[in-house]
Image (tube, coloured by chain):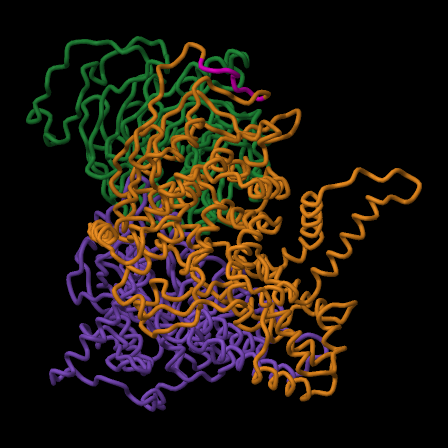
Chain colours: A orange, B green, C purple
């Protein structure tokens, strides 16, 4: 295979390299590998990002929002050479980081499917808590693939299987894409016609884990959970060849899980209309272990690729769910190194994200040094990433001042409960961390309906893919009543502050800091002044000005 | 008759030999098979038990003599024949084809020619049935009409319109002067022959499915049958569509109480995915179904009649003991699914190839099944008796 | 599915063309051509109606029936308004309009894959990131109404393809979800048109500055989406109008009918290319029942649409394409199904530039192979473009690049061209 030759060549190159002292931390290894991936890399690599470029980018990537003007100015004024690392370490500890990862995992795992049996709140709380506690990806996989929905403590995690109703055509595709980086959908009816690595037996090997599972509706509690029968075989037929085959559970071409000899009494709980079936031997029980097994390299390669894409904007393998021999990674050695390193660190997501954020690859400017298309693809400059629906929502709300206003309100509400009404005893004090968590949760709840309007307009429901800007999205940004309400002058929101600012230079500075997280240059300042003077109604003009920046490419993209 | 037309007899008995009279579906076994070059679409045994007729994926009707095995091909239609019926005395055979025509044939003629062919419908004629008195035929076709014809002269004597989607089958009631027809969307319409009007519609959305992936409806009665007393109507078809363009749906046979117009049984087929193509009632108190799996094999299913069902506990224990297990899927109340009405077969006979039609012999001991591999196979529902093979017939001596 | 390893296959085309040109061979024009060739008056204001039958419509149940043969299936053939041409009985209304169409019966794409078949039929090439015919038309044909997106795809479901290849993003398909009007077509209160234009100008300036020395594709896509949004706002009335009940009575009330009515309206208003997709035809099981239903829905609606275009005098300037990604196997499987078949199948064309009332190509008696005049997606692509006055042997109007519009290895099907 061609990509195997590339892998061996790259390994030799890495071994013989006399570039620098041996890399120790992962981020250094990454930079070294990227540098060595092309002979002209150094000549083409972009400059490091400026402080404001880096700041905006890291805030978006680690907290899901742009920085506030205060955060921007503070960072700009800091002289510490280590400030970027400190900022990274600071941000990964914030509740907003957990929230942002919650969104990431939610979309990855559930593809924005509507709620069926597990409420969105339950599921998202499970994800948030897991991210807040830095639960490893391996553990999350276990949680998700072992939850049957019957136990309250683990019911939230059962959404992945439950809300797909353990339907083979839904669950198999999801497991393949999310945990293995393979979209096996086309292998349901026959071997994939175009991809040799996706045979029908891979599809049904996965199906076989849960082919005995079924949805059980408890007549008393009315709750739906997953039951399992003790018998049933998995047969499949190709619509092209009509050949019939059977399989036991297996992941890709790893060893099968053969059923044991049938027991005289195969059930712990026999299934009937009042009882969820629990067999003594459960095929489903083997699923998480099989997926996360050390021999299943697809598991670690997939998550490494996805987290790389999360930070860098382009995976080593693109599309992310198309790992196969004819679609090799752009940097096969590096992908393996990152995957193995992550495995050795017990799939600690926070660890990997910190390492990736510290790389020069990540911190390069998005301003290109070269026009050479082939070089561009190999991380000489940062990739522009479209903001996700949630990032766009939060950044827009923050820029216009809605977040601040709402946060004030949540603090007031919190203080009211804590301080009481003067007649009843106040509740127990809270430590600072718990307070931060609580306020972030309340803020998130308070603005959830606003965020939903963005996810409706901007979220793709057909899986991850290239940026596809639609006219409908443009109409939303340009004309939606929702954004118009945020632009009404109110309290100390952005439009109010700008309307009250007579100095055009200060107005431009405030505007740019609030929306674009940087200061304007002289040309930009002059352009703002001209725009403001062009129309008589100042408030309306300033609203338009804010709207223009919100519609701009600089705001729309993470650069 | 050529060598290739010589029926393949099993080790059991030749068709003409007597079998013990005890009907026991659990002993169902193949006794003989008749070959045609193209897959078969339907089959019927004449009321006198002399022949089995079959339609196929060509322009022919095939007739096999059940005594001699001799095959006769009846050309005349211009498309596939999908439905065959006989006059009550068995002297006449009527065929309906996708060319829109219905054909009249003398059943026992040496080399039958169609006595009459009429254009019954604009587009395909899907079904033909014969009135209990033998004087009328009923047909339905892709023009969404149900029509009634005079057997004697082939003239149209009635027409019923009202189906909004294509009707797939039509039957005369054994006693009442009524017709019943069912369409793609599961609507079962009852027609009053005397008044020429629709009596009512029984909705059976459970027998339909909308494939969201391909934006297409699937449904329609693949066979319909009344009990001889006319109290119960059976309709065979599909339910629970998953991917109908790949054949992933469940077979289903509904039993409907004629008087109350209510569905009284949902006859399921375990984990078998495909289509129920045929249904028959056996006077010994069971229902027979035949179907084709999406993967190419087939099954014969045997369910108890409602009044012959064992006690519930016994039923559940049996289901758990046998290979046929209830498909663990939630009921779709929007489609009128009622899990209380579900029944699994008490016996299944596995078939190598899909079954597209089933009929019972007049002596009630045998089944004729039309298969997807072009064979019409006869199955005996009695204990298999192993005898010496019948002497091989000399093709030269049986040449006509 | 091949990943772009960073070396664009088009670069090889560029190199090859330069080599050919540099070697002084008679390979036609190389290098840039001035845009004036795109302003040929003959090609102005031509339009395309694409009716895409998604999933692979069976040629044996539509354009190339073989009744009474071993593999012909149960349906019969019926005569059409063109003596000697018969099509399936499932298309009785279309049969009456056959004099407005021609059939190509000899397509061999050498693929049975949905995606590869679709892309080959849309792009005229079976490899490479080339633009769809709709995007090509949007770029090179002058629209009677520049306010409408040049390439509009009406479908209640389905894929969001990137149809531009290397063309500018504004020529990508604009997807309408059936007849639902896009939301937010109204400007905010107190925002006059003058203010809106000022906002639009300002945004364009900001984006131009931002785009300087950055990867452009996302930025251009964003800009294009705002431009399209502006155009849609100008045409608000078009999307919000109720469909005429008389039209609904004639076309039908199902989704495909409504989409066709909207498609006709958009063409009447001057949209360059309108594509209406009808789902689905991928009948591996119950092929005959499903084609009966799906073509039953298609037939009357399409015939009505074609008739309306004729009555309005639009056929002269509107190319009509009815196509799929492949046909279906002559062999009927045990599920009464037919499977994928890219080897010998058919499409129908009509309208602008097409010699109608004819049949090009043949398959053998059983339909198992092409017996005469084999063509593939490349030939057809060139034919569509020639029909609407675009010369596929010319190069794309892309600064700094030399890319032939059509596959230089093939030619249009001359017999189809008027």
> Does the segment drawn in magenta span residue A11?
no
Residue C215: tell me if it is visible.
yes
Quarter placement of the N terminus of chain B? top left
Give the tally of numbered discs: 0
Residue pushed farthest right?
A423
Q: Which residues are magenta?
A: A266-273
Residue B371 position (above or below residue A15): above
Residue A394 position (above or below residue A110): below
- The residue that appears at 33% across and 9% down in the rendered structure is B21
Residue B179: tell me if it is visible.
no
Q: In the image, residue C311 lies at what x, y percent?
A: 45, 78
Q: In the image, residue A86 lies at what x, y percent?
A: 54, 55
Between B309 and A192, the one nearer to me in the picture: A192
Between C112 and C387, the one nearer to me in the picture: C112
Residue A50 position (above or below residue A528): above
Quarter placement of the C terminus of chain B? top left
Q: Quadrant of residue C44?
A: bottom left
Residue C112 position (above or below residue C399): above
Q: In the image, residue C203 lies at what x, y percent?
A: 56, 79
Left or right: residue B384 compared with residue C272? left
- The residue that appears at 51% across and 58% down in the rendered structure is A82
Q: In the image, residue A429 lies at what x, y percent?
A: 78, 40
- The residue that appears at 19% across and 60% down in the rendered structure is C363
Magenta: main secondary structure equals loop
Between C314 and A356, the one nearer to me in the picture: A356
């Amino acid at each position: 295979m061609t990509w195997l030759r590339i892998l061996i060549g790259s390994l030799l190159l890495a071994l013989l390299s006399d570039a620098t002292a041996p890399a120790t931390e992962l981020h250094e290894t990454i930079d070294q590998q990227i540098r060595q991936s092309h002979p002209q890399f150094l000549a083409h690599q972009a400059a490091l990002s400026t402080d404001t470029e880096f700041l905006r980018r890291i805030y978006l990537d680690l907290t899901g929002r742009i920085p506030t003007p205060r955060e921007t100015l503070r960072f700009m004024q800091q002289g510490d050479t280590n400030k970027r690392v400190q900022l990274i370490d600071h941000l990964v500890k914030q509740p907003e980081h957990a929230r942002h990862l919650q969104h990431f995992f939610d979309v990855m795992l559930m593809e924005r499917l509507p709620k069926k049996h597990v409420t969105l709140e339950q599921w998202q709380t499970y994800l948030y808590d897991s991210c807040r506690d830095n639960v490893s990806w391996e553990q999350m996989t276990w949680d998700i693939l072992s939850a049957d929905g019957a136990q309250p403590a683990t019911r939230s995690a059962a959404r992945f299987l439950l809300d797909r109703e353990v339907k083979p055509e839904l669950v198999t595709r999801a497991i393949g894409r999310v945990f293995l980086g393979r979209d096996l959908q086309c292998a349901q009816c026959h071997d994939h016609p175009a991809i040799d690595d996706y045979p029908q037996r891979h599809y049904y090997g996965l199906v076989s884990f849960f082919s005995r599972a079924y949805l059980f509706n408890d007549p008393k509690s009315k709750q739906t959970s997953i039951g399992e029968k003790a018998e049933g075989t998995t047969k499949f037929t190709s619509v092209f060849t009509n050949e019939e085959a059977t399989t036991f559970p297996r992941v890709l071409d790893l060893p099968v899980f053969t059923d044991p000899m049938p027991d005289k009494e195969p059930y712990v709980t026999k299934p009937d209309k009042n009882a969820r079936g629990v067999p003594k031997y459960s095929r489903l029980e083997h699923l998480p272990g099989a997926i996360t097994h050390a021999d299943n390299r697809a598991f670690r390669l997939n998550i490494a690729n996805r987290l790389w894409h999360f930070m860098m904007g382009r995976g080593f393998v693109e599309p992310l769910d198309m790992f196969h021999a004819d679609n090799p990674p752009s940097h096969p050695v590096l992908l393996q190194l990152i995957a193995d390193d992550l495995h050795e660190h017990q799939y600690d997501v926070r660890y990997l994200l910190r390492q990736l954020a510290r790389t020069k690859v990540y911190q390069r400017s998005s301003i290109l040094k070269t026009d050479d298309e082939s070089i561009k693809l190999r991380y000489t400059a940062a990739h522009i990433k479209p903001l996700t629906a949630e990032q766009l929502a939060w950044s827009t709300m923050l820029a216009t001042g809605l977040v601040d206003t709402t946060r004030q309100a949540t603090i007031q509400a919190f203080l009211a409960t804590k301080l009481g009404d003067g007649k009843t005893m106040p509740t127990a004090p809270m430590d600072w961390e718990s307070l931060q968590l609580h306020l972030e949760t309340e803020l998130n709840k308070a603005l959830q309906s606003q965020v939903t309007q963005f996810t409706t307009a901007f979220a793709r429901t057909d899986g991850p893919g290239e940026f596809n800007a639609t006219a409908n999205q443009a109409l939303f940004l340009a004309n939606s009543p929702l954004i118009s309400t945020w632009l009404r002058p109110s309290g100390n929101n952005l439009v109010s502050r700008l309307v009250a600012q007579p100095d055009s230079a200060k107005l431009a500075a405030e505007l740019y800091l609030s929306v674009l997280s940087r200061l304007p240059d002289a040309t930009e300042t002059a352009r703002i002044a001209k725009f403001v003077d062009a129309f008589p109604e100042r408030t309306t003009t300033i609203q338009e000005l804010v709207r223009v920046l919100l519609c701009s490419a600089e705001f729309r993209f993470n650069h | 008759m050529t060598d290739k037309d010589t029926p393949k007899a099993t080790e059991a008995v030749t068709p003409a030999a007597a079998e013990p009279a005890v009907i026991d579906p659990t002993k169902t076994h193949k006794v003989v098979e008749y070959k045609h070059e193209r897959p078969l679409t339907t089959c019927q045994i004449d009321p006198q038990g002399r022949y089995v007729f079959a339609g196929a994926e060509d322009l022919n009707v095939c007739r096999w003599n059940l005594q001699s095995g001799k095959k006769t091909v009846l050309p005349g239609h211009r498309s596939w024949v999908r439905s065959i019926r006989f006059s009550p005395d068995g002297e006449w055979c009527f065929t309906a084809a996708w060319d829109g025509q219905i054909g009249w044939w003398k059943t026992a003629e040496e080399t039958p020619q169609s006595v009459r062919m009429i254009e019954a419908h604009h587009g395909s004629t899907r079904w033909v049935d014969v009135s209990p008195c033998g004087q009328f035929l009923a047909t339905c076709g892709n023009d969404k009409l149900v029509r009634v014809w005079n057997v004697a002269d082939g003239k149209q004597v009635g027409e019923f319109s009202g189906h909004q989607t294509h009707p797939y089958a039509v039957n005369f009631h054994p006693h009442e002067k009524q017709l019943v027809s069912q369409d793609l969307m599961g609507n079962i319409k009852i027609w009053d022959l005397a008044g020429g009007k629709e009596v009512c519609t029984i909705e059976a959305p459970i027998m339909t499915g909308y494939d969201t992936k391909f934006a297409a409806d699937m449904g329609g009665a693949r066979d319909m049958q009344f009990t001889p007393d006319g109290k119960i109507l059976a309709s065979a078809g599909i339910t629970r569509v998953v991917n109908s363009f790949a054949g992933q749906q469940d077979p289903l046979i509904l039993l409907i109480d004629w008087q109350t117009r209510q569905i009284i049984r949902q006859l399921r087929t375990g984990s078998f995915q495909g289509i129920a193509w045929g249904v028959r009632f056996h006077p010994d108190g069971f229902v027979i179904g035949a179907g084709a799996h999406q993967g190419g094999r087939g099954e014969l299913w045997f369910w108890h009649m409602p009044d012959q069902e064992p006690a519930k506990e016994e039923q559940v224990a049996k289901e758990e003991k046998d290979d046929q297990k209830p498909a663990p899927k939630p009921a779709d109340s929007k489609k009128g699914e009622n899990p209380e009405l579900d029944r699994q077969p008490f016996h299944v006979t596995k078939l190598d190839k899909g079954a597209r039609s089933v009929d019972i012999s007049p002596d009630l001991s045998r089944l004729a099944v039309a298969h997807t591999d072009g064979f019409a196979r006869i199955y005996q529902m009695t204990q298999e008796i192993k005898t010496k093979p019948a002497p091989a017939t000399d093709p030269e001596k049986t040449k006509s | 599915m091949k990943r772009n390893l960073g070396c664009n296959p088009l670069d090889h085309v560029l190199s090859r063309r330069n080599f050919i040109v540099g070697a002084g061979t008679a390979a036609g024009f190389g290098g840039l051509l001035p845009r004036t060739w795109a302003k040929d008056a003959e090609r102005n204001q031509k339009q395309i109606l694409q009716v895409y039958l998604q999933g692979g419509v069976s040629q044996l149940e539509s354009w190339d029936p073989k009744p009474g043969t071993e593999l012909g299936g149960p349906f019969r053939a019926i005569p059409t308004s063109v003596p000697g041409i018969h099509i399936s009985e499932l298309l009785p209304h279309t049969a009456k309009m056959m004099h407005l169409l021609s059939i190509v019966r000899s397509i061999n794409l050498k693929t049975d894959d949905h995606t590869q078949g679709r892309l080959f039929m849309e792009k005229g090439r079976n490899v490479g990131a080339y633009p769809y015919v709709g995007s090509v038309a949007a770029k090179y044909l002058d629209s009677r109404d520049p306010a409408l997106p040049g390439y509009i795809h009406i479908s209640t479901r389905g894929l969001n393809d990137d149809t531009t290849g290397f063309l500018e993003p504004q020529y990508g398909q604009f997807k309408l979800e059936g007849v639902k009007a896009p939301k937010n077509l109204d400007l905010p209160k107190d925002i006059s048109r003058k203010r809106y234009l000022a906002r639009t100008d300002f945004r364009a300036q900001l984006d131009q500055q931002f785009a300087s020395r950055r990867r452009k594709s996302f930025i251009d896509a964003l800009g294009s989406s705002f431009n399209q949004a502006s155009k849609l706002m100008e045409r608000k009335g078009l999307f919000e109008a109720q469909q005429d009940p008389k039209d609904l009575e004639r076309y039908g009330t199902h989704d495909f009918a409504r989409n066709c009515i909207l498609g006709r309206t958009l063409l009447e208003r001057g949209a360059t290319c309108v594509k209406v997709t009808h789902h689905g035809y991928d009948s591996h099981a119950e092929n005959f029942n499903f084609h009966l239903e799906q073509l039953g829905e298609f037939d009357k609606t399409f015939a009505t649409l074609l008739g309306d275009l004729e009555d309005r005098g639009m056929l002269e300037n509107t190319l009509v394409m009815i196509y799929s990604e492949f046909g279906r196997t002559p062999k009927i499987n045990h599920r009464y199904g037919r499977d994928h078949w890219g080897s010998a199948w058919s499409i129908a064309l009509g309208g602008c530039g097409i010699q109608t009332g004819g049949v090009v190509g043949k398959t053998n008696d059983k339909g198992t192979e092409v017996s005469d005049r084999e063509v593939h997606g490349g030939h057809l692509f060139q034919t569509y473009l020639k029909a609407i006055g675009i010369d596929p042997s010319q190069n794309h109007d892309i600064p700094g690049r030399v890319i032939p519009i059509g596959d230089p290895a093939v030619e249009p099907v001359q017999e189809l061209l008027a």
